[in-house]
Image: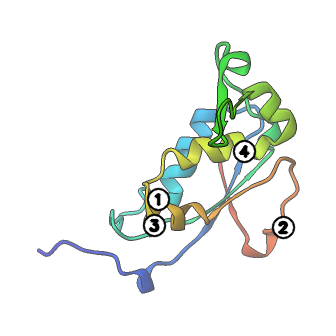
């Protein structure tokens, strides 16, 4: 029996909806990364983007365990001396709640062109409203 290798033209993509309200940040991120990557499918091929689209709503209502709300820092560096900016998770959720989830999910995807292509299929919204009803996303529960 030969090993099946998925071809990009043969892949049928579905849309999934995840509600992040009162869910743990890491649990939502791992489930989203698995679906984006296509690991939930029997035809998974590591070098082909065979994943599905993921829509995450209520990103502002995610939870974390322990003291991560105050202690977890998101760092960015401008490239100039003393250009390091640190933002705690608490402030990140107030200003840009989608960014915390994006950061977590992007770290779980492959680095390089395949990961960048896969990441484009992720749609995150702070509230419960989204404009992907036409795609009829299937609701997933954790």
Q: Is residue 71 left or right of residue 10?
A: right
User: Which of the marked residues, 4 or 1, is nearer the chain's N terminus?
Assistant: 1
Q: What residue sits right under mark 2 in the picture?
A: 131
Examine the rendering and report whether any part of residue 29 can be seen.
yes
Residue lying furthest top in this view? 67
CA distance separating discs 1 and 3? 13 Å
User: Pointer 1: residues within 10 angstroms few (<14), some, or many (20+)?
Assistant: many
User: Which of the marked residues, 1 or 3, is nearer the chain's N terminus?
Assistant: 1
CA distance separating discs 1 and 2? 23 Å
Residue at image coords 64%, 13%: 66
Mark 2 residue element? loop
Q: Is residue 11 above or below residue 126?
A: below
Q: What residue sits right under mark 3 in the picture?
A: 113
CA distance separating discs 4 and 1? 19 Å
Residue lying furthest left in this view? 1
Q: Which mark is residue 37?
A: 1
Q: Is residue 14 above or below residue 124?
A: below
Q: Quadrant of residue 89?
A: top right
Residue at image coords 55%, 49%: 106
Residue 140 x/y as whole percent: 64, 51
User: Pointer 2: residues within 10 angstroms few (<14), some, or many (20+)?
Assistant: few
Mark 3 residue element? helix
Residue at image coords 65%, 33%: 81
Residue 10 x/y as whole percent: 42, 84
Asked if labels 3 and 2 touch by Cβ distance under 8 angstroms, the answer is no
CA distance separating discs 4 and 3? 21 Å
User: Pointer 4: residues within 10 angstroms few (<14), some, or many (20+)?
Assistant: some
Q: Which mark is residue 99?
A: 4
Choose between 79 and 9: the one closer to the eye.
79
């Amino acid at each position: 029996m030969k090993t099946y290798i998925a071809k990009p033209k043969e892949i049928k993509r579905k849309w999934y909806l995840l509600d992040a309200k009162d869910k743990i940040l890491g649990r939502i991120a791992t489930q989203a990364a698995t679906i984006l990557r296509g690991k939930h499918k029997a035809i998974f091929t590591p070098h082909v983007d065979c994943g599905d689209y993921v829509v995450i709503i209520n990103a502002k209502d995610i939870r974390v365990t322990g003291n991560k709300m105050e202690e977890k820092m998101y760092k960015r560096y401008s490239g100039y001396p003393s250009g390091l900016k640190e933002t705690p998770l608490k402030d990140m959720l107030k200003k840009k709640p989608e960014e915390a989830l994006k950061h977590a999910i992007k770290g779980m995807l492959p680095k390089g062109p395949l990961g960048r292509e896969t990441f484009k299929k992720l749609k995150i919204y702070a509230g419960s409203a989204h404009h992907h009803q036409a795609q009829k996303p299937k609701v997933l529960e954790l």
